[in-house]
Image (cartoon, rainbow, N blue to C red):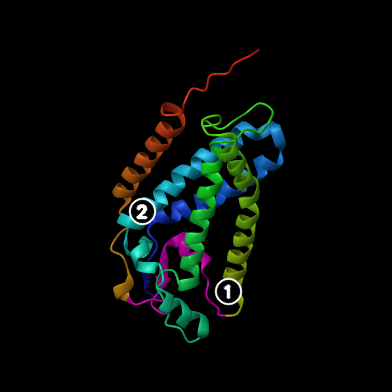
């Protein structure tokens, strides 16, 4: 029986698939117009909590989840791009995969944060709508309505890369993100993590939920409306 080693911790895997489901649901609710706009806004809050979790987990999570372990240096990135077929195998994210993680965090952050400051011109608005100048609101609206196109492009590129690894390099990247494990043919035993830090993950997740609740409910400004 092939020996397997734990590489991707459980909190990271839950984040990964929860993140994917949130993006898909946010796209669907946005396409339905005013009917599902409230759900769309709630999904934006979920996205904020997920982003906050990933940033914290990238600082204190297990080895392969940490930014310090996978964010590539310019030298390592150039080396990988020059000869990807002969590049040293990585237990976690390869340099291009690492860039995709960073890109998606930045894009979703821009999408979710900008949504806090805009409205749908009909019934609903973000909790911070009206708290900034009209010029900044226009910037936020532009970001919210255009960043998603870049997200779609990044997602398509991500799926294309997974397909390439599966069909050409004969490496399944999806299964390890489900099971958390890779075989001895893929990684060394020294690359394995001892456990998923589940208790720490639950604490971090709870802190992120509390933070987002504070941000969008408790700390949200009350904007006075004047009628003439």
- Examine the rendering and report whether any part of residue 145 can be seen: yes
Whole-Å distance between the Cαs marked 2 and 1?
Answer: 28 Å
7 vs 78, nearest the viewer: 78
Instruction: Give the mark nearer the N terminus: 2 vs 1.
Output: 2
Residue 6 locus on image (x, y percent): 36, 65
Q: Nearer the viewer, mark 2 or mark 1?
A: 2
**Marker disc for residue 57:** 2
Q: Is residue 130 above or below residue 19?
A: above
The span shown in magenta is 169-188
Residue 3 in the image: above or below residue 150: below
Q: Are marks 2 and 1 in contact (CB under 8 Å)?
A: no
Is residue 196 among the parts visible in the rendering?
no
Q: Residue at x 32, y 50 (%)?
A: 198
Residue 175 counted in the magenta span: yes
Among all residues in the image, which is located at the extreme top? 228
In what element is the residue under mark 1? helix
Residue 71 horizontal/vertical position (percent): 40, 67
């Amino acid at each position: 029986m092939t020996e397997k080693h734990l590489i991707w911790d459980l909190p990271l895997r839950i984040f990964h698939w929860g993140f994917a489901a949130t993006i898909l649901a946010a796209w669907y609710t946005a396409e339905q117009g005013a009917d599902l706009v409230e759900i769309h806004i709630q999904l934006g809050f979920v996205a904020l909590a997920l982003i906050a979790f990933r940033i914290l987990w990238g600082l204190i999570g297990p080895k392969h989840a940490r930014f310090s372990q996978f964010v590539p240096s310019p030298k390592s990135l150039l080396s990988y791009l020059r000869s990807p077929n002969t590049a040293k195998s990585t237990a976690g994210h390869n340099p291009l995969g690492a860039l995709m993680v960073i890109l998606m965090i930045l894009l979703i952050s821009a999408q979710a944060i900008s949504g806090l400051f805009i409205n749908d011109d009909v019934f609903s608005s973000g909790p911070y709508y009206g708290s900034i100048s009209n010029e900044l609101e226009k910037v936020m609206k532009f970001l919210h309505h255009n960043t998603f196109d870049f997200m779609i492009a990044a997602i398509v590129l991500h799926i294309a890369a997974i397909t390439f690894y599966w069909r050409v390099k004969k490496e399944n990247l999806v299964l390890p993100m489900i099971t958390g494990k890779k075989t001895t043919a893929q990684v060394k035993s020294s690359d394995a993590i001892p456990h998923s830090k589940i208790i720490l993950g639950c604490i971090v997740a709870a802190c992120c939920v509390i933070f987002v609740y504070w941000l969008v409910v408790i700390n949200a400004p009350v904007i006075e409306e004047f009628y003439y």
